[in-house]
Image (cartoon, rainbow, N blue to C red):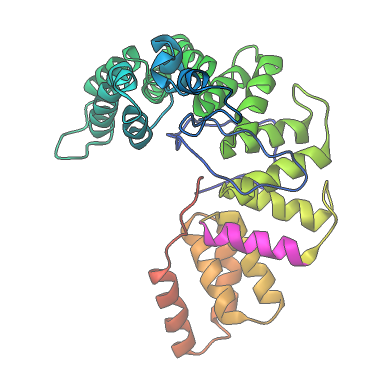
Amino acid sequence: MKQKTWPCKSDAIHFTALPFMKKPNDSSAFTKPAKTHRSFFNSTPKTPSSSSSSSSSSDFSALPYDVLSRIAASFSLPNLKAASLVCRAWRDALKPLREAMVFLKWGKRFKHGRGGVKANLSKALDSFLKGAARGSTLAMVDAGLIYWEMGRKDEGIAWYRRAAELGDPAGQCNLAISYLQGSPPNTKEAIGWLYQASYAGHVRAQYQLALCLHQGRGVGRSLQEAARWYHRAAEGGYVRAMYNTSLCYLMGEGLVQSHRLARKWMKKAADHGHSKAQFEHGLGLFSEGDMMKAVVYLELATRAGERAAARLKNVILQQLSATSRDRAMLLADSWRALPSSR
């Protein structure tokens, strides 16, 4: 994984499959965002005046089908199953969305060649479109992604917008990115969608919003706000945000300068597979005299394509015993990146 050291105008963002629900840690610098999917299962009246009013206010079946379908459009299968147990009316109303989950599952199998089937982009798209037709925003986002990868960007954007308007954070984020990459870019609308997705807890949107704030792209430049959004995305597991958070602490840009916290976030980014972070963390270990660990991180960075890391690693290896060299290479071979939101 190769990343640029610091945001610049050439940081084009490529779409990737995104997790549908995130629970990032909150930051004291922000108001806690409202959850994307609200629960109606505990909405009992506080002070019922009579048995009839209590009955009517708890009558979940009275919720119109179209309203329920919009609310549940971005639900995952477990949430749909739980909602379907509320009452018979909900079970019937949510049947199309449960069917959409089947098409979504097959679409992912065809897209990635999993579950005993060969990869087939055409069949994957067909499955996603069938899921989207049944109202699932998750399927809409995946359909939009395939259209985008096929070069049919207008159709991809149309599906992103449908998902975004139904409140799907991934659809909002991808729609915003497509606007940023447009010719000419529509930065004003992109920023609006990024804020919506960011407050809903979507870590990739938070990172993209931080980049825009850092660059002053489509919004007034604010290093402090950019740093806070980097930090929030980093706490949510977004690796590039971890790296940029480290740089903010290191240089005192938007955050109070702290070499301790800079090193903490640099190590986190390195342990999650960020190649530049591995190189820079290796440099830090080398400067502290921890040659063994320095070699391990520099070797990881070298394997990821960081050429400067290879030169320093070779210099350090000459200072180690044969046993230490073998031990360092063994540690590098057995290393696995920690899971992340990318």
**Who is closer to the viewer here, 2 or 168?**
168
**Can residue 264 be seen here?**
yes
Q: Residue at x 25, y 22 (%)?
A: 99
Depth check, front residue: 27 or 270: 27
Q: Where is residue 65 shown, x and y percent of the image?
A: 39, 11
Q: Can you give x and y, in whole percent of width and height, for residue 81 in the image? A: 31, 33
In the rendered view, would you say 5 is above or below 116? below
Q: Quadrant of residue 280?
A: bottom right
Which residue is at the front of the view, 46 or 325? 46
Q: Is residue 304 above or below residue 218?
A: below
Magenta stretch containing residue 262, yes or no?
yes
Q: Magenta stretch mostly in which secondary structure? A: helix
Q: Which residues are magenta?
A: 260-272
Drawn side of residue 148 relative to residue 215, left or right? left
- Asked if residue 78 is positioned above or below residue 73 in the image, the reply reads below
In this picture, residue 87 sits left or right of residue 42 = left
Q: Where residue 5 sits in the image (x, y, percent)?
A: 67, 48
- Seen as rendered, the residue at the extreme left is 116
The percent coordinates of residue 95 (x first, y second) are 27, 20
Q: Residue at x 63, y 52 (%)?
A: 242
Question: Residue 308, can we see it?
Answer: no
Which residue occupies the foreground of this view, 298 or 272? 272
Vertically, is 333 above or below 76? below
